[in-house]
Image: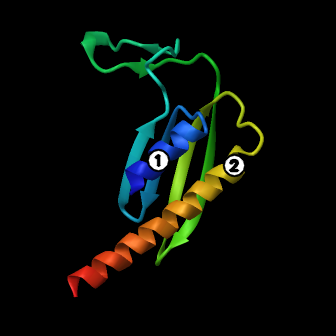
Amino acid sequence: MLQQAAGLAALALKGLSCVATWGDQSAGASGVQPDGDDRVTASPGGGAPRATEAKPAHVLVASAPCRDRQLTLTLTLSGAGGEGRGELLGLIATVAAGALDCLLTRSLVDAS
């Protein structure tokens, strides 16, 4: 669930990357698209592609309550944050927290 939330935020908000955390668990995703994006270059040693940027980065953080913890999304953007992205990141965090709560409830019901 955390991986999906991070991936959705990174792609939908055109972020370089996003990390979703809930308690001691975390997952990250890249929003950089290797097909046609001139910011992507091959890694030294032939590894996976990596993003290179000359612009300053901007970080947005949004949290939503989920049980006794906060689900937090930390989105890294290239350049300025842009209007409305913070609000949309908050919406994604809220929906992800609700979905995680439903999954946790379901796993408890299935276990009993």
Q: Quadrant of residue 82?
A: top right
Q: Secondary structure at mark 2?
A: helix
- Apparent side of residue 3 relative to residue 81 in the rendered image (left or right): left
Q: Kindly identify the amino acid type of the residue bearing the numbered disc 2.
A: Gly
- Apparent side of residue 82 relative to residue 60 in the rendered image (left or right): right
Residue at point 57% right, 40% down?
12
- Front position in the image: 26 or 38: 38
* Residue 53 in view, yes or no: yes
* Residue 70 in view, yes or no: no
Disc tally is 2
Q: Kindly identify the amino acid type of the residue bearing the numbered disc 1.
A: Ala
Q: Residues within 10 Å of mark 1 (few under 14, many from 20)?
A: many
Q: Quadrant of residue 43?
A: top left
Picture colour scheme:
rainbow
Name the residue tied to disc 1: 6
Disc 1 + disc 2, Cβ < 8 Å: no
Q: Earlier in the sequence, mark 1 or mark 2?
A: 1
Residue at point 55% right, 62% down?
95
Quarter of the rendering occupied by the N terminus:
bottom left
Indicate which disc residue 86 carries. 2
Residue at point 45% right, 43% down?
7
What x and y, as percent, mark residue 32?
48, 27
Residue lying farthest left?
111
Indicate which disc residue 64 carries. none
